[in-house]
Image (spheres, rainbow, N blue to C red):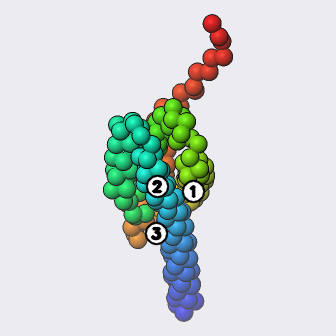
Amino acid sequence: MKRSGLVILAIIAALVLWGISTQRGLVGQDETVKNAWNKVQSAYQQRSDLVGQLVNTVKGVANFEQKTLTDVIEARAKATSITLDAKDLTPENMAKFQAAQEQLKGSLSRLMLVAEQYPQLKATENFTKLQGQLESIENGVKADRNTFNDAVQSYNVKVRSFPASAIAGILGFKAKEGFKADAGTEKAPVVNFETK
């Protein structure tokens, strides 16, 4: 009787230790996702801060297209109004967040295209500097998004794999949503070098 009691105690102790280890692993990966998400938000905030400086620089050029500036300002306001906590990374929330960021990115692209028509703006040292910073920030955003997606994938594999999924379900750990490709990127661009 003593021997079977010790075996049962050993099994229970092993299960408890396994549960604690699994919980710690889930918490560690959850924190990695949160940290990666904070880096993504920081990169987007850096871009948003730069947009304000860029708009103010462009405003100084006489007769610059007001609608383009208004679009950028509105897109920036919308992008910064959507705050998303790492615990709320659902497909719906991520889609809203990503759509707002893509709207800002699109309006910035249009601003840069329109700016090409203003030689005095392109000659401004401050504009050129801001344009270079914006390109650098966009590269940082891409890198941070990739790091975030890697962290989400690793976390989701653990949360969804048995037997860790049992502990994850009990403790409320749920799969998280990563970034998806931007709308329309599944279609290859048409490049035509023919001249008439």
Q: Residue at x 35, y 38 (%)?
A: 66
Which label is found at residue 167?
3
- On the rendered structure, is 77 left or right of 28? left
Residue nearest the observer in this picture, 1 or 157: 157
Displayed quadrant of residue 148 = bottom right
Say what amino acid the circle numbered 1 marks. Answer: Asp
Which label is found at residue 65?
none
Image x and y of residue 80, in percent: 37, 56
Q: Mark 2 points at which residue?
A: 53
Image x and y of residue 41, in percent: 47, 60
The tally of labels here is: 3
Compare marks 3 and 2 and give the one earlier in the sequence.
2
Compare marks 1 and 3 and give the one earlier in the sequence.
1
Image x and y of residue 58, in percent: 45, 45
Say what amino acid the circle numbered 3 marks. Answer: Ile
Q: Is residue 148 at least partly visible in the picture?
A: yes
